[in-house]
Amino acid sequence: MAVAGLFATSSLLLFAVMFWLADAGMLRTVDRSVLEQLVLLSERPPDLLPFMIASRMDHRPRVITSVGLFDPDGRLVVGDIATIPRPLRLDKTVQTLAIPDAGGEAQRVAGLRLHDGRILVVARSLRNVLEVRASLLRAFVLGLIPTVLISLLAGTLVGLRTQRRLARLHRSAERIIAGDLAERLPARPAGDELDQTAVIVNAILDRLQELVAALQGAGENIAHDLRTPLTWVRARLERARNGPGRLGPVRPLLDQSIGGIDQALAIIAALLRIAEIEHVRRHAGFAEFDLAEVVREMAEAYRPVAEEKDVMLEADVPHAVRISGDRDLMLEAVMNLVDNAVKFTPRGGRVVVALCGGIARPVVRIADTGPGIPPEERRMVLRRFYRSDKSRGSVGTGLGLSLVAAVARLHHFSLCLGNNEPGCVVELHCWEQAETGCDRSDADRDTAGRFSSFPRKK
């Protein structure tokens, strides 16, 4: 539409200039003809002037020019102009006036008072000029319509072509955001500025992939190297604790040391597990499974734990939802979320595990009535090893939500944190739905009103 408007505006300006030049040229031609006739007749002998006008009327030329000779009182002497048009200046000035005896048609008129007092009037019709004007307007309209249509077609084709290119770029960018650093933006060799920009971004991604691979490799190697000696140390400490002899006050220290080593081993196992999940080869094990069965299984598994803690755990899984992915990984992600919800909900609280959002765009939702997560910490809790002040007194590695986020990215889901007033809402959205309604920065606003049926603890 913008291209069509630009073409139409430029065509209109061009036509206006051409119309003004053509109209001015035709008017100059008419005025010159009127003045030439007026001067020619005024220079004739006064006694022959009536005869010449009458003779001219009998042999009218093809270019019609009307002439009228009037006495000093304005009465017609001879000619085809019956009355002097008003107001007519008698100084050879060409004016556009309507002549009554010509049907009120507008004409270019010039008048002159002769030496003997008589008045000579010459007029020429503007019919030809008006016809040319109408022809130009018709030509402009007929030319403007195809111009606008062609510009609309051209704009549509260019827009669709650009839209398809941008769609390909967006799809590649979404895969990169989802964690596939091997993806590259499509770029044509020797392309336009957009392709050149894509080439630059791809070069940045190449370097970024190298750095991330080096960093991940270093982390994985460190984790592998630490796991074996820590396991040996733990085994020796446990052997010393369970061996013969009286340990006395040393036994609590051995128990604390073994607990610390178990914590370190749990962190190493979680890091290696996240690295395994984020690796691209995990896609090879994808298969279709029922997400509702996974959610229901986790809810049933944690119901005894919740009852022991005097926490009400409810499951709302109305129908089966089949998705493609790794069932064990999704089971592990839901288990982490349910475990956190039960762990941080105080006695007498409530946890709801639900599957909603429809079959096409399922949403796994875990809501509790615990202390919740402040809005300013909702991005940070997804980082590795970050622990909120409210959770530092509980057992954990600070890697649970990082593992859940890795599983979500692998399955094209998005992890969203919200506010349950009181408590926390954690949702796993399909990637498409996450784009429209799961902005983490607005998670509390997006989900605060969707759990109004939950009890409000005083």
Image (cartoon, rainbow, N blue to C red):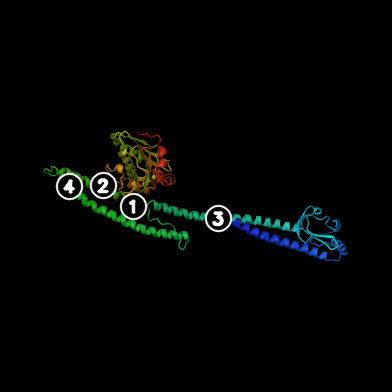
The residue singled out by tag 3 in the image is 155
The residue singled out by tag 1 in the image is 279
Nearer the observer: mark 3 or 1; the answer is 3
Question: Residue 350, position in %: x, y?
Answer: 34, 35
340 is higher (above) or lower (below) than 116: above
Question: Residue 419, position in %: x, y?
Answer: 38, 40
The residue singled out by tag 4 in the image is 237
Name which residue lies at 13% across and 44% down.
243
Label of residue 266 in the image: 2
Is residue 443 shown left or right of residue 232? right
Nearer the observer: mark 4 or 1; the answer is 4
| Secondary element type, mark 2 | helix
90 is higher (above) or lower (below) than 314: below
Which callout, 1 or 2, points at the residue further toward the start of the chain? 2
Q: Could you give the CA–CA distance between mark 4 and mark 2, rounded to whole angstroms?
A: 17 Å
Which callout, 4 or 3, points at the residue further toward the start of the chain? 3
